[in-house]
Image (cartoon, rainbow, N blue to C red):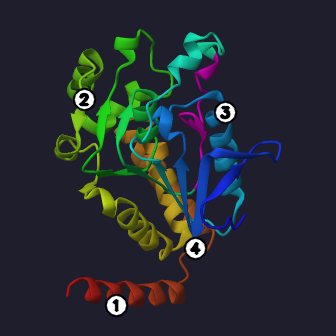
């Protein structure tokens, strides 16, 4: 795809859509939800554009890592409730099937969430589907499903307990209260909290670290994490063992290649210890 800087996404029929903006540089695609006037609420148009965008990025061999963020001041306010209130869409049509990441297709490439502002309800679920999260100091999270009177359909009741524990997840869903960035960090919901201006540079630096690794190895490990999260701990060990067996059987650990990578790892470790 090799999208130029800050280009509108291409819709499923080739039509341009400015509700999603894509920036691709050095193997890293930054996807920006671009409805700032609506706090990036997921309208039908935006959901369609997201699906098309992620399908394109998955097929683009020049993209190794995806960073997902929102146009300031919000990350994502969830479903566009004004649209739903007008009766424009059947709520049941927004419930997604297994094998997706909330309102976006499942992809094999690492997905970093750069949470620049509020992530509410469906926007919270969208964030939870990222492999890990980096939050701006302005980020806040809330599950307001019960306040609005709808039920989660994008995996929140599974993913939120995995991130923060079941009791904290129940509290967030039952109260609808907001969680600030520093508390999200202490609860383990996000990996880092950074100054707002540093959010995308920080995420792109993490993405560059990922790009510098073996592409197939990164994707296989993340897939193993995903597969293991869906079974019991004992079964997850078998999932990992089988993944390792298949990896070795495919000839992915040739001695000379392992030695070359070992030397590169040692050199990187020395540079990071200074």
Please tell me whether residue 5 is drawn above or below residue 40 in the rendered image.
below
Q: Nearer the viewer, residue 58 or 177?
A: 177
For disc 1, the marked residue is: 267
| Secondary structure type for disc 4 | loop
Q: Residue 81 carries which label?
A: none
Measure the alpha-carbon separation of dots 3 and 4. Answer: 42 Å
Which numbered disc, 1 or 3, marks the residue that appears first in the sequence? 3
Of marks 1 and 2, which one's residue comes earlier in the chain? 2
Q: Where is residue 51 in the image (x, y as percent from the top left)?
A: 66, 41
Q: Residue 45 carries which label?
A: 3
Q: Which of marks 2 and 4 is in front?
A: 2
Decide if residue 40 is in sight here.
Answer: no
| Of pointers 2 and 3, the one earlier in the residue sequence | 3
Question: What whole-number distance in Å separates the C-alpha atoms at marks 1 and 3?
Answer: 47 Å
Q: Name the residue under label 4.
A: 252
Kindly report which numbered mark, 1 or 2, lies closer to the viewer in this rendering: 2
Q: Which residue is drawn at 40% across and 90% down?
A: 263
Which is closer to the viewer, label 3 or label 4? 3
Q: Specify start and end residues of the magenta stretch as a single range.
A: 93-108
């Amino acid at each position: 795809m090799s999208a130029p800087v800050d280009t509108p996404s291409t819709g499923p029929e080739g039509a341009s859509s400015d509700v999603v903006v894509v920036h691709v540089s050095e193997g890293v695609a930054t996807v920006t939800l671009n409805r700032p006037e609506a706090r990036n609420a997921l309208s039908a148009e935006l959901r369609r554009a997201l699906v098309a965008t992620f399908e394109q990025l998955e097929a683009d061999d020049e993209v190794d890592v995806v960073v997902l963020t929102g146009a300031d001041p919000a990350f994502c306010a969830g479903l566009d409730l004004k649209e739903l209130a007008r009766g424009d869409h059947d709520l049941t049509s927004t419930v997604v099937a297994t094998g997706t990441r909330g309102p976006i297709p499942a992809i094999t490439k690492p997905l970093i969430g750069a949470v620049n502002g509020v992530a509410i309800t469906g926007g919270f679920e969208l964030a939870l589907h990222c492999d890990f999260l980096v939050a701006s100091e302005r980020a806040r999270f809330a599950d307001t499903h019960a306040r609005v009177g709808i039920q989660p359909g994008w995996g929140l009741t599974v993913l939120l307990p995995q991130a923060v524990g079941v009791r904290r997840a129940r509290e967030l869903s039952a109260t609808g209260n907001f969680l600030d960035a520093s508390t999200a960090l202490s609860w383990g919901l996000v990996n880092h909290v950074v100054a707002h201006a540093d959010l995308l540079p920080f995420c792109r630096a993490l993405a560059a670290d990922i790009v510098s690794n073996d592409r197939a190895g990164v994707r296989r490990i993340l897939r193993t994490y995903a597969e293991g999260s869906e079974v019991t701990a004992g079964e997850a060990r078998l999932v990992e063992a089988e993944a390792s067996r298949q990896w070795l059987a495919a000839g992915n650990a040739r001695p000379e290649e392992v030695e070359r990578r070992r030397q590169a790892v040692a050199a990187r470790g020395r540079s990071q210890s200074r």
